[in-house]
Image: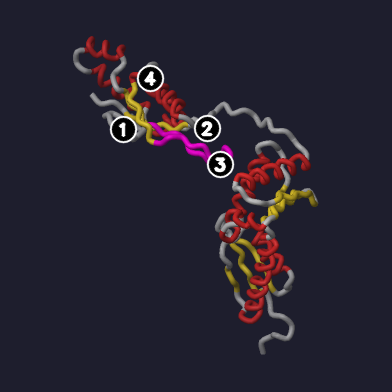
Amino acid sequence: MSYVEIEVRAKTVDLAVEAAMQELGVDDREELAVTVVQEPERGFLGMGGTDAIVQVKRSKPRKRQRDRGKKGGDGSQNKGSRNRSGNGGRSRSSGKGRQNKGKSAEGRTSKGRDMSKRPDKKEDDRDDISIDKQTEIVKDFLGGLVDVYGLEGEVVTKVEDDVIIADIKGEQTEALIGVRGSVRSAIHELTRTVVQRYASDTARIRLDIAGYAERRREALTIYANQLIEQLMEDGGELMLEPMSSADRKVIHDAAAANEHVTSYSEGDPPKRYVVLARTDKPDGDEEE
């Protein structure tokens, strides 16, 4: 006799096995054969980890089912037991009768497999903390990040127009920038996430590392002005490569300074890009 095998995902191996026991209707863990497909891993600073994944099936039938099978004599009880187990498993199964008519075995076990999405989540209990307190959280987090990487640097923070401005200074901190600011963007997003764990209403955060943001703005402004000059000569439209929201704003600001050029964004993040377009012909450039 073969038994249904299900795959379960949870924060720990024990939680995954407990979920499997509930789905299979088993009270004794010794009745299960458990294969650990993936061990859980903790993410950086408690975020971005991976769940445990286990494959579970009965190693022997439950005693009550075995007794009923003897009374039937025709195997009907064993067949029913097999179907009952199949209803609790995934569509991926090692036993027969794994799906019932018109019903998906996948949907019936989703709650047991994904323990990270519990239906009884608590209401938002985060505090409405001040922007000064949020600034302290930002500074403490970024300072700890610099220390973890073993870099020599200083974190300077201030508040301007309800925006938290954080600047990580120091030559060694350039290691936190990455190609085209990719690492800096990730740190910026991670910092926002950390503040959101404590505050229900978070302020905007502007992050710079080793003066990269200013250098990037200057380079993008020069690049945008060169494209605008090209548009003034050739007309038409120019589609730029995907950029972050901060980089797109630099392009839009450069276009806004020229009355004969307009700009707009298209696409979905992270592949959202800017389009520059010639709106009309400047004075003295009319066609005869």
SS class of the residue under badge 3?
loop
* Closest to the observer, 180 or 129: 180
Q: Position of residue 19 (x, y in %)?
A: 44, 25
Q: Is residue 46 magenta?
A: yes
Looking at the image, tell me whether mark 4 or mark 2 is earlier in sequence order: 4
Q: Callout 2: helix, strand or loop? A: loop
Residue at 75% across / 35% down in the picture? 128
Q: Position of residue 51 (x, y in %)?
A: 47, 35
Labels 4 and 1: the sequence-earlier one: 4
Q: Where does the magenta region start and end?
A: 38-54
Callout 3, which amino acid? Phe
The circle on residue 93 is 1
Query: Of callouts 3 and 1, which one flags the residue occurring earlier in the amino acid sequence?
Result: 3
| Dot 3 and dot 2 residues touching (CB under 8 Å) | no
Q: Which residue is mark 4?
A: 29
User: Residue 57 sits in which quadrant?
Assistant: top left
Q: Kindly identify which residue carries mark 2.
A: 117
The residue pinned by badge 3 equals: 44
Q: Is residue 200 above or below residue 63?
A: below
